[in-house]
């Protein structure tokens, strides 16, 4: 009987966890959504510190040569703020692209500068 209750609780918890907004993928620090007119990607920071980002069209990402920016003046979504990024500013974007990858991180002080805390990725339908 206890096993049945545990299974039922697990099914209910899984169902509730799946009730997130399907058009707003998110990580622990950032949410992303698209706006159809004008076509733009909206990034919403859910934390009290800046979240730095790099956005690329999904198929172009493997072809790009980039380095994570570790300077506090790099593109960032301000603390508890939002940024709207027109599709034309997405690296490798072309008309008809279906997905973008939003790489994002926070910066941590380190001797001689800053380093990313960890790099997170969101795949966002366009």
Image (spheres, rainbow, N blue to C red):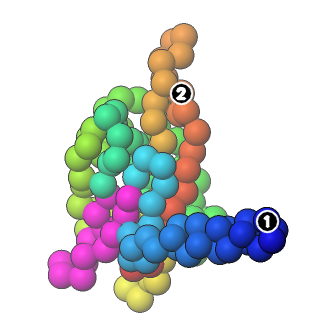
Label 2 – label 1 distance at C-alpha: 48 Å
Is there CB contact under 8 Å for labels 2 and 1?
Answer: no
Q: Residue at x 35, y 29 (%)?
A: 72
Helix, strand or loop under label 1: helix
Relative to residue 12, is residue 44 drawn left or right? Answer: left
Query: Which residue has dot 2 on it?
Result: 115
Q: Nearer the viewer, residue 118 or 75?
A: 118
Q: Which quarter of the figure has residue 89?
A: bottom left
Q: Nearer the viewer, residue 42 or 24?
A: 24
Q: Main secondary structure of the magenta part?
A: strand
Q: Nearer the viewer, residue 68 or 36?
A: 36
Question: Quarter of the image containing the C terminus?
Answer: bottom left
Helix, strand or loop under label 2: strand
Query: Which residue has dot 1 on it?
Result: 2
Residue 92 in the magenta stretch? The answer is no
**As displayed, is residue 50 above or below residue 41?**
above
**Residue 49 drawn at (x, y percent):** 34, 33
**As displayed, is residue 40 above or below residue 78?**
below
Q: Is residue 26 visible?
A: yes
Question: Quarter of the image containing the N terminus?
Answer: bottom right
Of mark 2 and mark 1, the one earlier in the sequence is: 1
**Residue 21 drawn at (x, y percent):** 39, 73
Relative to residue 63, is residue 48 drawn left or right? Answer: left
Residue 37 in the magenta stretch? The answer is yes
Q: Residue at x 59, y 67 (%)?
A: 13
Q: Residue furthest front?
A: 1
User: Magenta residues, as a range?
Assistant: 31-43
Q: Residue furthest left?
A: 38
Relative to residue 1, is residue 80 drawn left or right? Answer: left
Q: Residue furthest top?
A: 111
């Amino acid at each position: 009987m206890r096993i049945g209750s545990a299974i039922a609780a697990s099914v209910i918890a899984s169902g509730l966890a799946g009730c997130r907004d399907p058009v707003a993928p998110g990580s622990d620090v950032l949410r992303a959504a698209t706006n159809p007119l004008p076509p733009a990607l909206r990034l919403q920071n859910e934390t009290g510190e800046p979240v730095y980002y790099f956005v690329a069209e999904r198929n172009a990402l493997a072809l790009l040569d980039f380095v994570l920016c570790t300077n506090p003046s790099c593109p960032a979504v301000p603390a508890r703020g939002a940024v709207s990024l027109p599709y034309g500013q997405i690296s490798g974007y072309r008309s008809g692209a279906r997905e973008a990858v939003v790489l994002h991180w926070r910066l941590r002080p380190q001797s001689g500068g800053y380093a990313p805390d960890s790099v997170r990725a969101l795949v966002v339908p366009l």
